[in-house]
Image: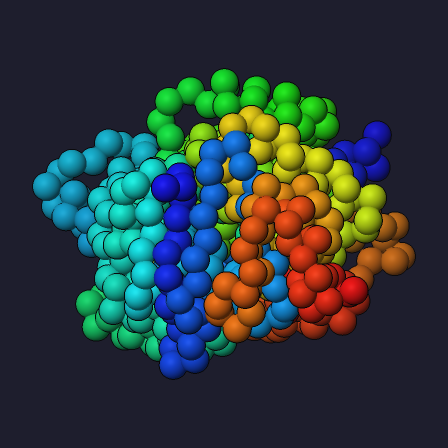
């Protein structure tokens, strides 16, 4: 049994069905990637895991405990953290205030966790008094990761962390994600850049029309001729 | 030497009739504009009920003042209205929270467009104005007791030997002092406290604020309470200075909105700067410069007319003109706010 599991999830936006029984899972210290064509329901899986969207069937298990009926806030308290694709910082607040807001639900001292974030992303310490909105794309993504880390999560869900950034920044962000994983967190991300993401992933889920089309380790999927042909451009 | 005295007299005159009145009027507008800005940044709509809410708050303060005076609970030298402000804030904040519960909350839950909520606020404006007129009537009330002057014109003349007097009204000193303290408090609250930061986060990125566990209902509540406090205090200070009349408060909406837009919509600092731009423009343009020029100019050039650029009855037009000029030339306002 994996640390975080979404099993046979069925969900719809209003009357439009999106997920038809798909499953994802990730363990601590592991990076799992969800790839697939547009409209496959990749981001929807994340919303269901976070409780932002209710599933009509299936279960969400965190460390064996069914969290499917809990609110988003309760799931965050239990150790889930989410980095949305867009607008994932507070642009007119300083880097440090962004981190403080990430820890809004905590009442204890934040210093230790903040030092952890700063040691992972040293540039943020330098820029801690600057507005997040004034930073570069890659640095802003680090702020977003840092903000999510402030609840000391065991699982981080990343929604297309490299959307719309240059290739150099993309490598930097993937580097950050590997660091997150190495620090012992479970990392589950949705990614458009399937090839690069599967390269660094421990596990991959290829979704098509709300169903698991292929599942396997990152390397297995990259080497699978069917996956290559369909999704990785031959 | 005589010419030097004339120059001093001219500037004493200007201080008495332009600088002091514009400073205190600007402070009153600034507090109102700050309330509008808070509501705009966090609740995402321009609150047309601001002027009438100020009337409501002031009315409550007047009722408490009358009650206190009847009971003999007065301290000589200080306006009773100041002591009753906390009570007036409690009542006004409760009233505004009720309007939120019965009007704005619905539109928030249904994710209504800002313009829809603005229309709803116009409804709240009329209802509030109606309630005020029902309770206290449309007539003017003067409710300021206590000392009227720190020093008056005659004392100033005797003391300095100048022919122009300078009257320093208690209300001017109170207005400016209280406004400065209050603005400091609001900025401190927003910058340094956890709740204040949560409000800024909510204003900056609502979805992310919710994901961070910030309670939206609490943010809304605190915003209204803060806005109601600013509103009540602004209203009471204006009333101590110029008397209370429901219609006049209703019309204050114009200069207040002008302040907000001139300063930069959504920028608290801009709202304050804008308020002083508006107040100084109003006072400078409606002041009759005849006497001022007589002091400064040689006798041959002395003006015959009042040298008043715009009649006082047109003072609300000044806010309008400023609004139009700013929207045409610099729509972001002084402090780069949002563009409507």
Q: Is residue A45 visible?
A: yes
A228 relative to A108, above or below: below
Task: Residue at 67%, 57% (x, y): give it.
Answer: A224
Task: Residue at 67%, 65% (x, y): give it.
Answer: A226
Residue A172, picture quadrant: top right
Task: Residue at 82%, 58% (x, y): give it.
Answer: B302
Looking at the image, which is closer to me, A129 or B191? A129
* Residue sitting farthest toward the bottom: A15
In-image side of A65 versus A187 (left or right): left
Where residue B301 sits in the image (x, y, percent)? 88, 58
Q: How did the renderer colour the structure?
A: rainbow
Where residue B242 sits in the image (x, y, percent)? 43, 55
Task: Residue at 30%, 66% (x, y): give it.
Answer: A57
In-image side of A69 versus A202 (left or right): left
Quarter the C terminus of chain A occupies: bottom right
Quarter the N terminus of chain A occupies: top left
Where residue B319 sits in the image (x, y, percent)? 62, 67
Figure label count: 0
Looking at the image, which is closer to me, B27 or B95? B95
Where residue B66 sits in the image (x, y, percent)? 18, 50
B207 relative to B86, above or below: below
Looking at the image, which is closer to me, B188 or A81? A81
Looking at the image, which is closer to me, A52 or B136? A52
Q: Is residue B17 visible?
A: no
Residue A39, picture quadrant: bottom right
In-image side of A222 versus B75 (left or right): right
């Amino acid at each position: 049994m994996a640390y975080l599991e979404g099993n046979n999830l069925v969900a719809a936006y209003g009357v439009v069905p999106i997920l038809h029984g798909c499953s994802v899972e990730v363990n601590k210290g592991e990076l799992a990637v969800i790839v697939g064509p547009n409209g496959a329901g990749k981001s929807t899986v994340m919303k269901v895991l976070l409780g932002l969207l209710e599933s009509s069937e299936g279960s969400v298990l965190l460390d064996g405990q069914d969290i499917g009926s809990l609110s988003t806030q309760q799931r965050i308290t239990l150790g889930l953290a989410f980095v949305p694709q867009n607008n994932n910082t507070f642009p007119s607040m300083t880097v440090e205030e962004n981190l403080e807001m990430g820890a809004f639900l905590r009442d204890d001292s934040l210093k230790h966790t903040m030092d952890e974030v700063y040691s992972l992303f040293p540039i943020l310490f330098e820029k801690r008094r600057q507005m997040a909105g004034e930073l570069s794309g890659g640095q802003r993504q680090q702020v977003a990761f840092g903000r999510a880390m402030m609840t000391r999560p065991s699982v981080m869900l990343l929604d297309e962390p490299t959307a719309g950034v240059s290739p150099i920044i993309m490598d930097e962000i993937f580097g950050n994600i590997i660091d997150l994983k190495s620090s012992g967190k479970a990392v589950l991300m949705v990614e458009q850049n399937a090839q690069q993401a599967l390269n660094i992933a421990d596990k991959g889920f290829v979704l098509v029309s709300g169903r698991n089309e292929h599942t396997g380790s990152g390397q297995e999927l990259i080497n699978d001729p069917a996956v290559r042909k369909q999704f990785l451009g031959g | 030497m005589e010419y030097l005295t004339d120059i001093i007299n001219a500037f004493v005159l200007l201080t008495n009739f332009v600088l002091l009145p514009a400073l205190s009027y600007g402070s009153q507008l600034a507090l109102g504009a700050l309330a509008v800005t808070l509501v705009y940044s966090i609740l995402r709509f321009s609150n047309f009920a601001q002027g009438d809410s100020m009337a409501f708050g002031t009315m409550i303060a007047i009722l408490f003042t009358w009650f206190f005076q009847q009971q003999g609970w007065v301290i000589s030298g200080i306006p009773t209205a100041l002591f009753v402000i906390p009570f007036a804030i409690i009542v006004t904040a409760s009233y505004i929270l009720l309007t939120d519960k019965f009007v704005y909350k619905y539109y928030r839950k249904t994710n209504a467009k800002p313009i829809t909520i603005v229309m709803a606020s116009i409804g709240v404006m009329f209802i509030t104005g109606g309630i005020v007129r029902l309770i206290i009537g449309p007539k003017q009330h003067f409710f300021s007791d206590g000392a009227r002057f720190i020093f008056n014109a005659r004392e100033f003349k005797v003391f300095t030997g100048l022919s122009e007097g300078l009257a320093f009204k208690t209300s001017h000193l109170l207005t400016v002092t209280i406004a400065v303290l209050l603005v400091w408090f609001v900025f401190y609250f927003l910058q340094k406290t956890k709740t204040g930061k949560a409000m800024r986060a909510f204003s900056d990125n609502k979805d992310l604020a919710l994901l961070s566990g910030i309670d939206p209902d609490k943010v809304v509540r605190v915003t209204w309470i803060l806005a109601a406090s600013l509103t009540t205090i602004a209203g009471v200070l204006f009333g101590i200075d110029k008397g209370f009349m429901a219609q006049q408060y209703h019309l204050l909406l114009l200069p207040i909105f002008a302040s907000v837009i001139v300063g930069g919509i959504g920028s608290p600092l801009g709202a304050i700067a804008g308020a002083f731009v508006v107040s100084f423009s109003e006072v400078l343009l409606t002041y009759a410069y005849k006497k001022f020029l007589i002091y400064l100019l040689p006798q041959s050039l002395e003006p015959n007319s009042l040298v008043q650029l715009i009649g006082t009855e047109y003072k609300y037009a000044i806010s309008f003109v400023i609004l139009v000029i700013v929207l045409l030339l610099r729509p972001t306002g002084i402090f780069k706010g949002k563009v409507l």
